[in-house]
Amino acid sequence: MLPLSVRIGFFLAVRQIRHASLWTTSLIIGVMVLTFLNLVVVSGILVGLIQGSIDQFRAQSTGDLIISNLTDKSFIENSPNLLTLLDTIPEIDSYSARYIETGSVEANYQTKRAKDKPNIAGTAVTGIDPAREDSVTGISQFVIKGSYLGPNDFDQVLIGSYLLKEYFPVESPGLQVLDNVDVGSKVRIQVGGVLREFTVKGILKTKVDEVSRNAFLVDSQFRSMIGRTDGNVDQIAVRLKPDADPAAVRDTLIRAGADTYARVQTFEDAQPKFLKDIVATFNLLGAAFSSIGLVVASITIFIVIFINAITRRKFIGILKGIGIHGRVIEISYVFQSIFYAVIGSGIGLAMVYGLLVPYFARNPIDFPFSDGILVAPIDETVARIALLVVSTVIAGYIPAWMIIRKNTLDSILGRK
Amino acid sequence: MIVTKNLIRTFVTGDIVTQVLKGIDFESKDGDFIAIMGRSGAGKSTFMYQLSLLDSPTDGTITIDGVDTHTMPESKRVEFRLTYFGYVFQDYALLPELTALENVALPLLMQGKKRAKAYKEATTALERMGLGHRPNNLPSQLSGGEQQRVSIARAVAHKPKVLFADEPTANLDNESSEAVMQIFKELNEEGQTIIMVTHEEVYARRAKRLIVIDDGRIKSEEKLHHKH
Ligand SMILES: Nc1ncnc2c1ncn2[C@@H]1O[C@H](COP(=O)(O)OP(=O)(O)OP(=O)(O)O)[C@@H](O)[C@H]1O
Ligand SMILES: [Mg+2]
């Protein structure tokens, strides 16, 4: 059984709310809804932009773990031993060993006249085992034209869309893109001193630079092109089983000596620093916007309850006069504040999960790094509701307390 | 029983010191029906506020059933007002959001009575005041006389030791005033102690004792005898 004062406070609050002006109530609830949206949506979208980017980077490029060459080496020495080690780790679902070199792709060289500037774009060139790569990063689903590589697709290339003018229409002196390239076009790829002609088999389009600014070849052919006969690779992207903890697997690998010849990182370790900076900045921005909203909501509630309590000062006096304890009256105001906050949050909740989250899932914000979605994890949302309710309760309690502690008789008689 | 000794109440506003009650010795026994009269500004209301623990005297003592109220903390005073006293204010002082029945039931609920019991007793009190047919009206949906009767119902539903009424008929027409006075008479006959301030001598004379306050002092006291 609740304490008497709580029950009577509730009783009084319900009666007051029921007879409050519809306009005022709607207005206050409106403010609460906006505050709630401000709390959840602003940071949800900011975080969503960047979270989308992080998720994509993990899914399409690094996998859960990424093993790369030591900074002073140009590839992972002793790769075969490392790959054998990976085969023994039960948490590993699949991995893709990659050969990566910088090179260039040239298009339109057949039609070029002698004085024309060659149409060349600098790019990473990556040799992959198409099936293994796909099992780690699923990049075949990003082939928007043509088709994905097969194991024997020699002299064929998958071109990232950021290399193509059609998809990435920039033209600056430092950054060239290829004009007039489509599935079936011939391009020349140069890596080191070797130049070879390839046919475009497919075009890859994602918002991850590591995929879209890349040219993918079948690994066996690429090995011979760069003269790598020792089985050493440049990078291994590892995908773990769903419940595995990347940091734990990383540590297992390091304990097994994997870091002698390679750098072992989780997807998080490997995040570019700028991404981490943006996350930190957006979190800060989100928190700043949210706290401004919270302060505004608190002030609104403060003013509303203050005006309510002032105009009802006489009745508060009468209540105290006939023996209703001040605590009960305070509780009645706290309940009213909670009512506004909860109804406001409830409507906001329905809007966020019923309208906005599905809307952004269907129509992601087209952001250069990512497809921005609305990130509103339920536990964080609940925490924000709690925050809103707590600040409203405090904001409602203070003015009620201020008026209620005034002299009973003065309140009844309207003195001072 | 309420006893006051040398009750003094002084108001200080800036440099101006107003002594409103200048030493009142007073006693009311259980079952009393006391009417207080006096000129406007004489200190009648101020005196009532002291007796009913809504205000505290500057000097002197108030003893209620042997309990000295001087040292009582506010929380205890609230409880005292809830259980010992009932109030009828000149302007009814009903809570606008509560129905007639809820207004009457509120002090009962606050005393910890179960909802059903509180509403039953409140209904009984309302019926007694001839308002059994409008329990669910808000105060704004009642006439002045009806509101005053609701306020009396609220003041007596919990069977207080003392019923205070400060000019309960001031805003009412003759008929309603008459009804209120009739109720007071009946309540007193059942043993309810009543202390009432009024400007109307005809009503004052229906009490058992008539006290006249003038300039902060009791000027005269008269025992009234009624034929039954
Ligand atoms: N808080 C206060 N500060 C200063 N003076 C006050 C205060 N309260 C009452 N007084 C003064 O005390 C005097 C008595 O007031 P009180 O209300 O007791 O008179 P009353 O006898 O009830 O008069 P009425 O018949 O008009 O109701 C008045 O002169 C009033 O101005
Ligand atoms: Mg008066």
Image (cartoon, helix red, strand yellow):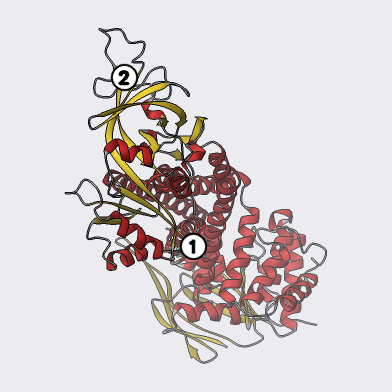
Residue A411 tag number: 1
The percent position of residue A70, horizontal first and vertical second, equals 21, 52
The single residue placed furthest to the bottom in the displayed view is B66
Callout 1 and callout 2 share a chain: yes
Tags 1 and 2 in contact by the CB under 8 Å rule? no
Q: Nearer the viewer, residue A294 or A370?
A: A370
Task: Report the side of A375 relative to A324 (left or right).
Answer: left
The amino acid type found where label 2 is placed reads Glu
Question: Residue at horizontal 66%, vertical 73%?
Answer: B155
The residue tagged 2 is: A171
Res A398 → quadrant = bottom left
Whichever of callouts 1 and 2 sits on the residue coming sooner in the sequence is 2
The percent position of residue A371, horizontal first and vertical second, equals 46, 38
Question: Residue at horizontal 41%, vertical 29%?
Answer: A161
Quadrant where the C terminus of chain A sits is bottom left
Answer yes or no: is residue A23 visible. Answer: yes
Q: Nearer the viewer, residue A207 or A23?
A: A207
Question: Residue at horizontal 43%, vertical 53%?
Answer: A298
Q: Chain of mark 1?
A: A
Q: SS class of the residue under badge 1? A: helix
**Discs 1/2, front:** 2
Measured along the vertical axis of the image, is residue A55 above or below residue B178?
Answer: above
Answer yes or no: is residue B167 visible. Answer: no
